[in-house]
Image: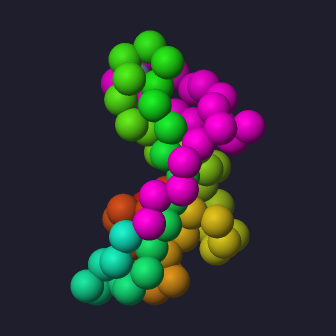
Amino acid sequence: MEKFYCPNCNKFFEAEGQKKEWQSSVFGYCFKLVAKCPECNTECNEWRPKGPSSKGSGSCSGGTCSICPGCG
Ligand SMILES: [Zn+2]
């Protein structure tokens, strides 16, 4: 189980999560984990505490973008 954050409800919840992949014309291959909020059914991003080590799961290969939870 991963931890997710719903900006709509301002709540954290845990869910299995689904990998979402896309190609960015700027950053190339990107992916992140998303899950539906149990309360409002909004697609939410995986919660990742902000920190210097944002590389890895949920980051795009380009390093910094405003889309990936690992970069934003
Ligand atoms: Zn919600």
Colour style of the rendered protein structure: rainbow
Q: Is residue 10 visible?
A: no
Q: Position of residue 13 (x, y in %)?
A: 60, 25
- The residue at 58%/26% (across/down) is 12
Question: What residue range appears in magenta?
Answer: 1-21
- Left or right for 9, reference 26: right
Which residue is the extreme one toward the left? 25
Of 11 and 51, nearer the camera is 11
- Left or right for 45, reference 49: left
- The residue at 36%/29% (across/down) is 42
**In terms of secondary structure, what is the magenta stretch mainly?**
strand
- The residue at 46%/85% (across/down) is 62
Q: Is-magenta flag for residue 47?
A: no
- Left or right for 45, reference 53: left
Where ligand 1 lies, by image quadrant? top left
Of 53 and 9, nearer the camera is 9
- Left or right for 20, reference 4: left
Q: Position of residue 49 (x, y in %)?
A: 63, 49
Which residue is the extreme one toward the top? 39
On screen, residue 9 above or below 54: above
How many callouts does the rendering have? 0
The C terminus sits in image quarter: bottom left
- The residue at 46%/58% (across/down) is 20
Picture quadrant of residue 23? bottom left
Q: Is-magenta flag for residue 15?
A: yes
Q: Position of residue 1 (x, y in %)?
A: 74, 37
Q: Is residue 8 visible?
A: yes
Q: Position of residue 51 (x, y in %)?
A: 64, 61
